[in-house]
């Protein structure tokens, strides 16, 4: 008699792993909408990053306290190697945040979406170069299509899409660092934000002291404080869902984020020429090949069910 594992979409969609993954990438995809009001009342990219670091630290600390993960945090802080590596990952994520916030508040939202489309393909290439992971023909095709898309995008906008490349490189590198650290997701995030919070607070105090800050108005404070849960909650949802979903499912869901960001850029009226459309067609095809290849690999290694 064969046994069959329950479907990941069984049960309540809102609380199932697939539902949480969709929620995670949906939040990441609509993040530009949270920054638009701040930009409208004069908040700049660096001020947003300062508040994002501060309130992410507050929320991460609150969740560590609520979930009783202080022992994990103490273990990290007691290990010099982990402290240094999380300092590196905090610098990578801070760079990623800074470029992303600047992009979505400066008319480069579509280009930022391009960066997150190519991130999983860049991760695949990094795995082959750094960890000698084997890339099958589907993976090579996906990477080739992504490279073609970036080249065409360069032709379409008249310069190298550095926003997309920096976002992909920093987030991809961040993923590589965190993947190989024996650190729980939330404890690691708390330590990363702890590294960022002191310079963030110093900058914000200086900004307000010189009359250039925008925090001390009720509506302004609300939007700045909202950057905390918008940063922390998707990472918590991702950490939960990633352990419970097949790679092929997560590989498909992850493209929800840049797709929503891309649509927001279009609705905001960013230029989208036919040549730029061709470049995204290559990227989307590469993403599709990536998901299909991941599905085939998962199917190939699926264990034979016991009779």
Image (spheres, rainbow, N blue to C red):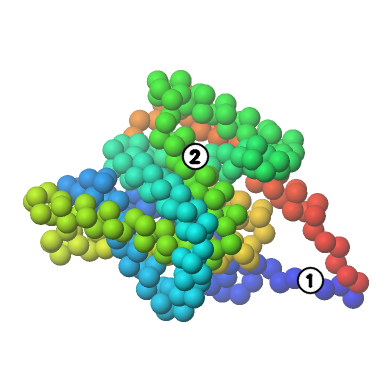
Query: Residue 52: x, y in percent?
Result: 31, 56
In depth, the one of 266 and 214 nearer the eye is: 214
- When asked about the image quadrant of residue 242, the answer is bottom right
Write the residue at 13% across / 61% down: 216
Query: Which numbered disc covers residue 160?
Result: none
Write the residue at 57% across / 39% down: 122
Q: Residues within 10 Å of mark 1 (few under 14, many from 20)?
A: few
Query: Residue 209: x, y in percent?
Result: 10, 54
> Is disc 1 placed on a helix, strand or loop?
loop
For the question of whether residue 268 can be seen, the reply is: no
Q: Is residue 211 positioned above or below 17 on the image?
A: above
Q: Nearer the viewer, mark 1 or mark 2?
A: 2
In depth, the one of 251 and 211 nearer the eye is: 211
Q: Is residue 96 positioned above or below 246 on the image?
A: above
> Is disc 2 placed on a helix, strand or loop?
helix
Query: Residue 192: x, y in percent?
Result: 41, 58
Query: Which numbered disc covers residue 4?
Result: 1
In depth, the one of 58 and 288 nearer the eye is: 58
- Left/right of residue 62 with respect to residue 147 in the rendered view: left
Q: How many marks?
A: 2
Q: Residues within 10 Å of mark 2 (few under 14, many from 20)?
A: many
Q: Is residue 86 positioned above or below 111 on the image?
A: below
Q: Extreme left residue here?
A: 211
Pointers 1 and 2 in contact (C-beta within 8 Å): no
- When asked about the image quadrant of residue 231, the answer is bottom left
Does label 1 or label 2 sit earlier along the sequence? 1
- Left/right of residue 286 with respect to residue 69 in the rendered view: right
- When asked about the image quadrant of residue 11, the answer is bottom right
Write the residue at 71% across / 72% down: 6
Tell me the quadrant of the picture where the C terminus can be found: bottom right
Residue carrying label 2? 169
């Amino acid at each position: 008699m064969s046994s069959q594992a329950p479907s990941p979409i069984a049960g309540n969609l809102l609380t199932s792993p697939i539902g949480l993954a969709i929620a995670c990438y949906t939040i990441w995809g609509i993040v530009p909408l949270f920054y638009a009001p701040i930009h409208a009342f004069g908040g700049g990219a660096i001020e947003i990053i300062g508040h994002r670091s501060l309130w992410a630290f507050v929320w991460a600390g609150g969740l560590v306290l609520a979930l009783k993960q202080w022992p994990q945090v103490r273990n990290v802080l007691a290990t010099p190697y982990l402290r240094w590596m999380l300092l590196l990952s905090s610098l990578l994520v801070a760079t990623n945040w800074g470029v992303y916030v600047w992009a979505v508040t400066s008319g480069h939202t579509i280009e930022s979406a391009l960066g997150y489309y190519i991130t999983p393909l860049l991760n695949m290439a990094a795995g082959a170069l750094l960890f000698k992971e084997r890339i099958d023909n589907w993976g090579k095709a996906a990477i080739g299509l992504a490279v073609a898309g970036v080249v065409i995008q360069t032709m379409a906008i008249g310069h190298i899409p550095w926003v997309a490349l920096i976002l992909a490189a920093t987030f991809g590198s961040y993923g590589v660092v965190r993947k190989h650290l024996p650190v729980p997701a939330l404890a690691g995030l708390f330590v990363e934000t702890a590294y960022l919070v002191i310079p963030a607070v110093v900058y914000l105090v200086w900004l307000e002291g010189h009359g250039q800050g925008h925090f001390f108005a009720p509506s302004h404070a609300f939007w700045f404080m909202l950057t905390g849960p918008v940063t922390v909650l998707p990472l918590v949802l991702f950490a939960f869902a990633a352990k419970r979903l097949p790679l092929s499912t997560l590989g498909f869901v992850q493209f929800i984020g840049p797709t929503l960001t891309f649509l927001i850029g279009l609705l905001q009226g960013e230029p989208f020429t036919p040549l730029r459309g061709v470049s995204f067609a290559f990227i989307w095809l590469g993403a599709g090949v990536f998901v299909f290849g991941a599905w085939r690999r998962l199917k190939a290694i699926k264990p034979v069910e016991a009779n």
